[in-house]
Amino acid sequence: MALEGIVKHLTTSKESDPVETKPKSKTLINRKKLHAMIPLAERTIYNMEQRGDFPRRIALTSRNVAWDLAEVEEWIDACKASGPAPRPGIGA
């Protein structure tokens, strides 16, 4: 009897769960599109990735990488929200 109730709960809970949403599709951009959006040198982007200051690249193959468009856009929005960049050589 108890096992019957568990099986019924497991088979119906996913179907009737209003909180569950469909997985979001990811849009990936290649290096060329990234550089069109972010006018920084390849090495600068790489260094920022290593420090955790920029979204990490995703290795698609041994010679092809991409970035998650949503993460890059979030990074751009965060940069905009942080205000103007400090001028070089001006005291902090």
Image: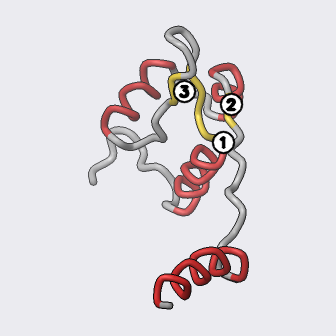
Q: Are marks 1 and 2 in contact (CB under 8 Å)?
A: yes
Q: Which residue sits at x=67%, y=80%? A: 12
Q: Position of residue 30 (x, y in %)?
A: 66, 24
Q: Position of residue 78 (x, y in %)?
A: 53, 57
Q: By what rule are the colours in the image chosen?
A: secondary structure
Q: Secondary structure at mark 3?
A: loop
Q: Are marks 1 and 3 in contact (CB under 8 Å)?
A: no
Q: Which residue sits at x=71%, y=26%? A: 33
Q: Are marks 2 and 3 in contact (CB under 8 Å)?
A: no
Counting other residues with Cα less than 10 Å from the Cα at mark 3, is it few (<14), some (14-19), or many (20 or more)?
few
Which residue matches tag 2?
A: 29
C-alpha distance separating marks 1 and 2 = 6 Å
Which residue matches tag 1?
A: 69
Counting other residues with Cα less than 10 Å from the Cα at mark 1, is it few (<14), some (14-19), or many (20 or more)?
some
Left or right of 1, for residue 23: right
Which residue matches tag 3?
A: 40
Image label count: 3
Q: Secondary structure at mark 1?
A: helix
Q: Nearer the viewer, mark 2 or mark 3?
A: 2
12 versus 27 height, above or below: below
Q: Secondary structure at mark 2?
A: strand
Q: Determine the residue located farthest toward the top in the rendered image.
A: 63
C-alpha distance separating marks 2 and 3 = 16 Å
Amino acid marked by disc 1: Leu
Q: Position of residue 9 (x, y in %)?
A: 58, 83
Q: Which residue sits at x=59%, y=54%? A: 74
Q: Which residue sits at x=55%, y=84%? A: 4
30 vs 43, nearest the viewer? 30
